Image: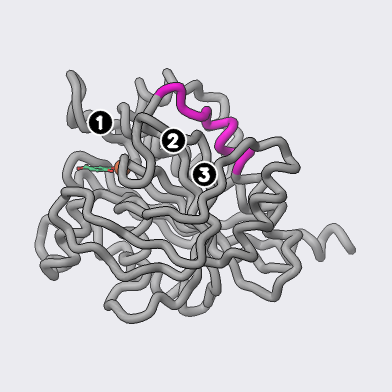
Amino acid sequence: MANVLGAISTSHVPAIGGAIAKGLQQDPYFKPFFDGFPPVHAWLAKARPDVVVVFYNDHGLNFFLDKLPTFAVGAAPEYRNADEGWGIPTLRPFGGDPELSWHLIDSLVAAEFDITMCQEMLVDHALTLPMALLWPGGGEWPVRIVPIAMNHVQHPLPSLRRSYHLGQTVGRALDAWDADARVLVLGTGGLSHQLDGERAGFINKPFDLMCMDALVGDPERLTRLSTRELVREAGAQGTELMTWVAARGALTGAVTKVHSTYHIPISNTAAALMVLENHAQTVARVRAA
Ligand code: DHB
Ligand code: FE
């Protein structure tokens, strides 16, 4: 049985990639954001994941408006980054885990999620930057990945309720995966931000803090928000919260918060970071007792 260690959620603003490339981690503008990560690195050193399931949203690199799956699961042996036009360097390829990909695809389709399966998939800044934040310094990535892309580009978007159920189905599939593997779940995006239109620059700190709090102990609360309410409260791109909700859904055990930070702004975004630990074994032991 695989061991689901926990979930990390973090923002994925392209400016972070620029800061990494230029070594601006100590720059006063970026320092409060980067300072959130050493405790996460310490937690990762203890958790030692082998594989990361990444809930993220593609911004037009792999999928565009002509063909846009609601949910797409990667099933490739390798995933490459490519130039998106932000002026940030493309990162080295990521190794995949096709066995886990197909296990998740089987489980999702059995649970009536009509997902798109991708045996080739480019991964954009929403996947690459969080990976570079978690494992800085270059060299071989120490983990394999399974990317799960969620549509936040073309309405109608998947609801937070559906995103949570997606995560729960992935979590149950991970628990049932017959592999001696240590699994981390990653959700990337948000929190509140709007990049264009009349409300460009919109940020809602009270709403973000409510979401971060609810994600720890009461994620169901967020599933009661409609997409319209989410756009109103979090901005058009704040809908990326769906990836945090999916990642939280994948934790089937008792959940404790290890670490979180919240900083306004990085570029146009309320930049947040959270580490939740999953105590699956504890739950199983309590149930067995
Ligand atoms: C920004 C935020 C995003 O989530 C993104 O995908 C691109 C840009 C920003 O704040 O600039
Ligand atoms: Fe984004």
Vertical side of 272 occupied by 278: above or below: below
Residue that appears at 46% across and 22% down: 156
Q: Amino acid at mark 2?
A: Asn
Image disc number at residue 194:
1
State which region is magenta.
155-166
Q: Earlier in the sequence, mark 3 or mark 2?
A: 3
Residues packed near mark 1 inside 10 Å, few (<14), some (14 to 19) or many (20 plus): many
Labels 1 and 2: the sequence-earlier one? 2
| Ligand 1 within 8 Å of the CB at mark 1 | no
Residue 139 position within the rendered picture, expressed as x and y whole percent measured from the top left: 32, 81
Corner quadrant of residue 21: bottom left
Q: Which residue is mark 2?
A: 151
Which residue is painted at 42% across and 33% down in the image? Answer: 67
Ligand 1 shown in quarter: top left
Q: Nearer the viewer, residue 68 or 34?
A: 68
- Residue 258 lies left or right of residue 107; in this view the side is left
Residue behind mark 3: 72
Residue type (three-letter) at the residue carrying disc 1: Gln
Which sits in the foreground, 100 or 207?
Answer: 100
Question: Does residue 23 show up?
Answer: yes
Nearer mark to the viewer, of 1 and 2:
2
Counting every numbered tag in the picture gives: 3
Residue 271 vs 164, above or below: the answer is: below
Q: Residues within 10 Å of mark 2 (few under 14, many from 20)?
A: many
Q: Nearer the viewer, mark 1 or mark 3?
A: 3
Q: Where residue 109 appears, x then y in whole percent?
A: 69, 42
Q: CA distance from mark 1 to mark 3?
A: 24 Å
Secondary structure found at label 2: loop
Residue 247 against residue 33 in the figure, above or below: above
The amino acid pointed to by label 3 is: Ala
